[in-house]
Structure formats: C-alpha cells, structure tokens
Image: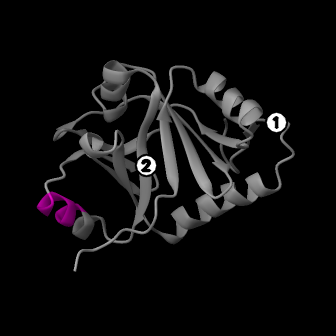
Amino acid sequence: MSKRFDGVFQFAYVVEDLDAAIEHWAHTLGAGPFFVIRNARYAAAEHRGEAHMPDVSLAFGYSGDVNIELIQQHDDTPSVFLDFLKSRGPGQQHVGIMSSDLEADTEMLAARGVAMVQRLVNESGVETRFFDTELHGGAMLELIQASPETAAAFSFMKAAAEHWDGVDAIASIPGAEA
C-alpha cells in the first residue's frame, strides 16, 4: 500500500512586490489578514545540495481553510524561489503539506523518483523541504515539519482570518515587527 499525505493546506506564490501582492490578495480576493516576516532568518539553508541563505520576505494569510503564502526574494542567492521567478515569472510556486516524519517522507519521495531540491530550517528549528514535482502539476511540493508550535502558528493565523474585518491587510505577529 502506498503512503498518502494529509491534504494540501497551503498554496504559495512567488511575487515581485510583497506589499502589492498582499494588497491584491486582501482587498481584491478577500484573503487575510497577512502576517509578514520581512527578511526571514534561517538557521540553515541548502539549495541543490549546497549551502545558500536567500534573503526572502514572507506573508501568510488565509482564504477559508487554505493558507496563502506570498514570497518575495530580495537577492540573487540560489533558491527554488529565484529559479521559479527566472523561469516562469511570478506565480504559484509550491503547495504545502504537513509532515510528521520528514525523513521517512523524504525517503518515500526519493523512492518514487522525486528529488529534494531545497531545505530550510528557521530560527525556531522548524524544517521545510522542497521537492521537484513541477513536471507533474506545475508546482513544487513543500513538506513542513509538523509540531505543536507549527500547528499553533497556523491555527492563530486561521483564527485571525475568521475574525478579520477586511480593513487592515497586514496584522502583527505577537512579539515581532512586520
């Protein structure tokens, strides 16, 4: 029997202007509010087996039950985001799925011929891995390390969206600056 992942919960878009994208998603499409991490810091980052630390800003919001992630890269450091932007321009770059066992899921995907092309570990220790699934669907797959902290963060953002009045497109992350 083949292992199945839990469902896709996130659609992520590489954008050229994060603030303009937030405004569009919030005030045209009704998603939000967005929680912004400018110049995200990583404890570790690898792209195609080599250490690279891209300078990216991220915004996370909700549209119903779907998490929307917007990503703007500020430099030319090799990354899946820059690869996508150079080859396709702005657009949907990946779908996100939670993984309770990154190692086992990575091995399973490798056995199916799907290569990991990027690995990021944020300063809180949460790891994400990106897999080259573009050939069969147009977007990469991101596995996000499941943890109580990760679940709490996404639950917090979803609850904020459920009570959002649609006015301010950007919300504050408790303890952080947008």
Amino acid under disc 1: Asp
For the residue carrying disc 1, how many other residues have a C-alpha within 10 Å: few (<14), some (14-19), or many (20+)? few
Outermost residue, front direction?
Answer: 136
Question: Residue under circle 1?
Answer: 168
The reply, left or right, for residue 85 in relation to residue 91 is left
Work out whether 21 lies above or below 131.
Answer: above
What residue sits 60% from the left and 59% below the top?
153
Element type where label 2 sits in the image: strand
**Inter-mark Cα distance, 1 to 2:** 26 Å
Asked if 93 appears above or below 107 in the picture, the reply is above
Residue toward you, 2 or 119: 2
Q: Which residue is mark 2?
A: 95
User: What's the mark number on residue 128?
Assistant: none
Q: Give the label, 1 or 2, closer to the camera.
A: 2
Is residue 118 visible to the viewer in this orientation of the structure? no
Q: Residue at x 57, y 20 (%)?
A: 17
Indicate yes or no whether the magenta region holds residue 108: yes
The residue closer to the viewer here, 175 or 58, is 58
Q: In the rendered image, which quarter contains the N terminus?
A: bottom left
Q: Which residues are magenta?
A: 106-112
